[in-house]
Amino acid sequence: MEIKFWGVRGSFPVWGKQLFRYGGHTCCASLLSSSGGRLIIDAGSGLKNLGEEIMKEPAVLAEPLYLFLTHFHLDHLLGLPFFAPLYSARAKIIFYSSRPAPQAREYLSRLMGPPFFPVSLAETPSQKEFRQIEPRQEVEVGDFRVSALALNHPQGSLAFRVEEGSSRVVWATDTEHPADMGMDPLVSFIQGADLLIYDAMFTPEDYPRYQGWGHSTWLYGTKLARRAQVGKLLLAHLNPDYDDRRIAEMEKRARKEFPSTRAARDNQVIKV
């Protein structure tokens, strides 16, 4: 399995020479199975670049595009109105989220259309299907098995565990850790994962000022990875106010706690 990151920031896309190393797009990743099956997680601003890449490979549209949404906050949806396959009659996009199908369609329809956008979701020519994935449920999509876990975040969010064969990747952004790790359901959910992508929105020093916002720290991520015996830890949902220097320092400190730690970067590719 191969995962490519098209966006690794949280809250808002950012740009500038001090942000080149890690990038500024909001959360989006694509997973490619060993046989070429594709799965997408989140529709942040990075989804635009992914869509352009997909349209260069017409054969990709012969199969459905599976798009899993962790939740409906704007930073995880910004790229959807600019996702090129949405405007192709050859594309079939299957959306998975925690909400019942009619509600998910309604939410995304409110994102696109007057007065906020010139084209409504219904007007786009792609085929669209909406499916619900509930916490602790497992679904099979193409080559992948995907299970979900409810996270501690305002209005709710999901973590996704994606498996293909013996490869296991967990995407767990937009979560706030409990005071007692023994009460954290993520411990069992991520147990033995090859790669954990975890919410590192705040440093431990900044976190007390933002407690209750629904985000975590690199330090808790390293403790979680060690406790659950994961292979590698990738710090994601990076704070838009943290520049390259600050993230590099965060990464350095995290590696002292859990050596197999890196900070995620736009366009980074990892084979699992």
Image: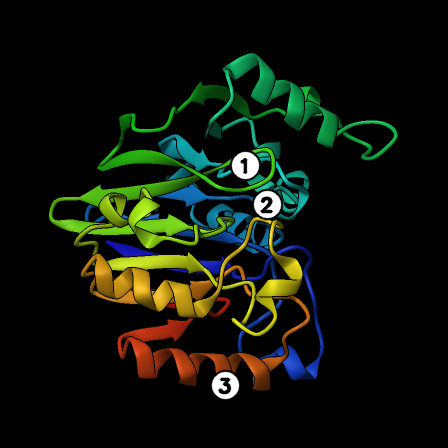
| Residue 69 x %, y % | 49, 37
- What separation in Å lies between label 2 and label 3 (alpha carbons)? 26 Å
- What separation in Å lies between label 1 and label 3 (alpha carbons)? 29 Å
Q: Earlier in the sequence, mark 2 or mark 3?
A: 2
Q: Is residue 3 found left or right of 244 in the rendered image?
A: left
Q: Earlier in the sequence, mark 2 or mark 1?
A: 1
Q: Quadrant of residue 144?
A: top left
Q: Is residue 254 found left or right of 90 in the rendered image?
A: left
Task: State the residue position of label 3.
Answer: 249
Task: State the residue position of label 2.
Answer: 76
| Residue 126 x %, y % | 56, 26
| Residue 80 x %, y % | 62, 40
Picture layout, residue 93 above or below residue 260: above
Nearer mark to the viewer, of 1 and 3: 3
| Residue 158 x %, y % | 44, 38
Picture layout, residue 5 above or below residue 248: above
Nearer mark to the viewer, of 2 and 3: 3
Contact (Cβ within 8 Å) of mark 2 with mark 1: yes
Q: Residues within 10 Å of mark 1 (few under 14, many from 20)?
A: many
Q: Is residue 211 found left or right of 39 in the rendered image?
A: right
Q: Amino acid at mark 2?
A: His
Task: State the residue position of label 1.
Answer: 71
Q: Is residue 12 found left or right of 148 in the rendered image?
A: right
Name the residue at 26% across, 32% down: 142
Q: Which residue is most to the top?
A: 102
Contact (Cβ within 8 Å) of mark 1 with mark 3: no
Label 3 SS? helix
Q: Amino acid at mark 1?
A: His
- Please state, as top left, top right, bottom left or bottom right, where the C terminus lies in the image: bottom left
Q: Residues within 10 Å of mark 2 (few under 14, many from 20)?
A: many
Q: Amino acid at mark 3?
A: Glu
